[in-house]
Structure formats: structure tokens, C-alpha cells
Amino acid sequence: MSRETSAQDAFEPSNDLIRREMKRHGVSADDVERVIDARNRLRAQDQAKGRNPRMSYDINASLQELGTNLRAYRECTDESIAGVRADVQSLQQTVARIENDGVHIAGGVSGPSVSASAMKVIEEDAQFVQAAEQATRNMRVGRFEARANLDTSIRAALTNEGKGNTGDTNVPSNPERRGFVDLVTRPLRLIEALPSRPTSSDAVEFVQLTATGNAAEQIHEGDAKAEIDMAGDLVRAEIVTIAAWTAASKQVLSDQGALSNQIDLVIRNKVLSRLENQLINGVGGQGKINGLINQATPITPAIATTPADMIGEALQVLTDNGYRPNLVIMNSLDWFRLQITRKNETDDEYVFGSPTSPLPASLWNTRIVTPSSMPGGQVLVLDTSFVNVLDREQMNVAVTNTHADFFVRNLVAILGELRAGLEVLDTGAVLKLALPDPTP
């Protein structure tokens, strides 16, 4: 054994001394044991090959000597500062065998966390072994590179925004966009069933004639004959304006093409639904439509007791009075109550067809419409040849930025509007009746 080797063995510290020194410098117990294991393994390899201990011998001697040797290593190389730091970190990773968190070593160098498998690959790299031997002999160390694939990341995981753990980096979420979901609107049934005619005035006036008395036989010559009294009442049907509007920014309408279509559809439906409601329930007066219920002639069935029979009797009364009834208006739930009428209490056979193939919406060969605005418990029976929807201005949707300060705010007003009215030329052509209470 050479004099140099003997001198080194004389100053070789024990494992217990190394443990105490490393713990005194704040190194965790697990990392201390990893360093001791690395030292023992390196020394065993040196002894088996009959060579002097590598730099790990001096590093493990004490944490203070490690800092001194690292400074000496930086002074003996003429590589750039960045290259020296990379070499020092590679040496430190091999010696320390740190698997978890990086540990601060005396001398100011910190090692990143890497896996044991990566450390094993690096320590067996030929370039690294050669550089380590040169460093132990205080020889000039040239540039070298040792690489290994890590089985765990040395930095926080890249995750979706809000989906990872604390400290992870993230990227913005990228959900699937389906666009706008259409708003549900009420069906319009009555407007399609009633006839309409255009008008160019703000109101329509007409005379409703009434006649009282009937013809009779002249019993004796010279007797007064039967007289019929004729009278006429001036009736005025108002043309009303029904409208609704909303506001939106110019940018959103430009960027969201589907949105403008949805706004158009919703405004149109809202305005037409209001018109349908007033055609049925309007109370009349200034700026109001005089609706069908308000103008209809009430009737009390004389012989019928069930809803279907009562409607049939009203149709017959209209027919007997000379009209041609062709439309029945009733609430949708009232019509459904009729549809579920069974032939008897023991069978599931229905009067108005089966649930899988129900009959068309009609009674006594007369069409039935069920607008959502029709009140429950009431029915209208009419001859539509005496009823007209007055069309002054058809439904239209306009867009403008001249409202208030919309121009400077880059907003637009979207307005839906129509003008319409209702004329009932003969109130005797419209009958209304009340259905019996379905509650037992």
C-alpha cells in the first residue's frame, strides 16, 4: 500500500461521524443513510479494482470537506461558470443519491430530486466515472455529459386548470362548446285557425244589426200583421300595438351569429303569444282588443250534461240559428280530460281512441283548437265566417342604435312589433258555455 493511501486511511472518518456531521447540517435521516450506502458501495468498487478512492471518499468524510473540495474543483477547471455548475450538480447527484426533496449541502450547492434508477444509470456512465476520478486526483476535468430518463418528474405536473394538486402548473380548460340551446316557446294555435284580413286604418267600425219579432199569420182580414223590429249598433274594433324589445351589444351580435337568430325567434313568439291571448281574453276599451269571450253570447245547455254532449248541443244551437259552426276553442287540459274518458270502469278501452292512436282533435265533425291562453272550464263555439283578425301591420323585428345613449355605448335595441285587432261581425256567431266542475 502506498504512503498516499495510508495517509488517507489514517484520516478516514467513521460512518457514525459522517452521520453526526450530516444531521448537524440539517440533512434528513433517510438522506443520511443514502449517502452512507453510496459511500460504502463506491469504496467497495474502488477496493475491488485496486484503485484509490474516488471523490466520494472525501465528500463523505465530512460536509465541510465536501464544500472545500467543490470549491477546489471549480478553481481547477477553466470551463464556463455554467458548465462548472452543471458538473458539480451531476457529481452531487451521484454521491448523495437523493430520491425525494433536494437537500442543501455545505458549500451552497443544492441537488434536485431524482429517482434511484436514474442515479444508478448516471453513476455507471463511463464519462462520469472518468471525470470523478480526475477530480479526486485534483486533475483538470474536461467537459462531459451524463443523461438518464427519469421515472418521476422533477417539477410539478402539468394539469388541466382546477383539476390537479396544489403547486401544479396548469393549462386553461377546453370544454366542448355546443352553441346556444333553443328556448322553449308556446305553440300558436288560434292565430292559424282564425281568418284574417288586412286594414289600413287605426280602427274598424261597422254596424251590427239585430232583429226582434217573427212572422205570423193574419187571422182576419184587416188585422195588423206581425212586425219585425230592426236595429243597428255601431261597433268599433280597435287596432292595438303589441310590442317587446331587448338590448344587446353590437359586439356580441357580431361575434355570436346564432344569438341574433334566437333573439328574433323569441321576440316574435312573445309578441304573437300576447296577440293570441288578447284575441281570447281581451277586455276592450282604449288601446285594448275586445276578445272573443267578452263578445260571445252565453248559452246554457238544456239537455246535455257531459262536456262532449254540451259542446254538441251548442253546435246544434248555432246550426239551428242559421250559422255554420266550424271551430271549437277549449283549454288543452279540458280536451285531454275528454280524451281519457273510458267506455266503462272495468275495461281500459277509451271512447276517443286508444292512447297509442288517438283520434284527431275534433268533436261532432268540428275542429278543436287548444290555445294555451284559453281559460279552463270554458268553451267557445263559433262560425269563423263572422270573425276576422284585423292585420294592420304584420309582425316585424327592427334593430337600431338610436335609442337613448346606445350609439356611444355600442348597444343596439331589438324591437318586435305588430298592430292588429279583432272584429266580430255578429256576436250570435260566437257562443260560450261553462263546463261542469270535474272535481267529484
Image (tube, grey):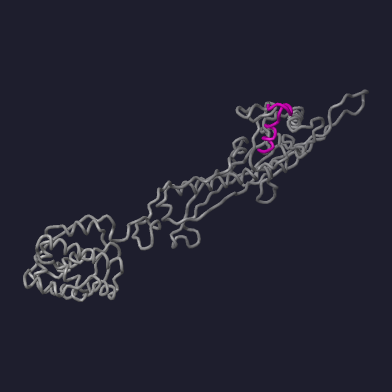
Q: Name the foreground residue: 186 vs 339.
A: 339
Quadrant housing the N terminus: bottom left
Looking at the image, residue 281 lies above or below residue 429: below
Q: Residue 230 in the image: state x and y as whole percent.
A: 79, 35
Residue depicted at 27% across the width and 66% down the height: 33
Q: Residue 291 in the image: state x and y as whole percent.
A: 68, 43
Q: Is residue 183 left or right of residue 299?
A: left
Q: Residue 236 in the image: state x and y as whole percent.
A: 69, 44
Q: Is residue 154 left or right of residue 316?
A: left
Q: Is residue 263 left or right of residue 195?
A: left
Residue at the farthest front position: 1
Q: Is residue 343 magenta?
A: yes
The residue range painted magenta reads 332-348
Q: Quadrant of residue 167?
A: bottom left
Q: Name the foreground residue: 419 vs 201.
A: 419
Q: Quadrant of residue 390?
A: top right
Q: Name the foreground residue: 36 vs 127.
A: 36
Residue depicted at 11% across the width and 64% down the height: 131
Q: Residue 100 in the image: state x and y as whole percent.
A: 30, 63
Q: Name the foreground residue: 353 vs 300.
A: 353
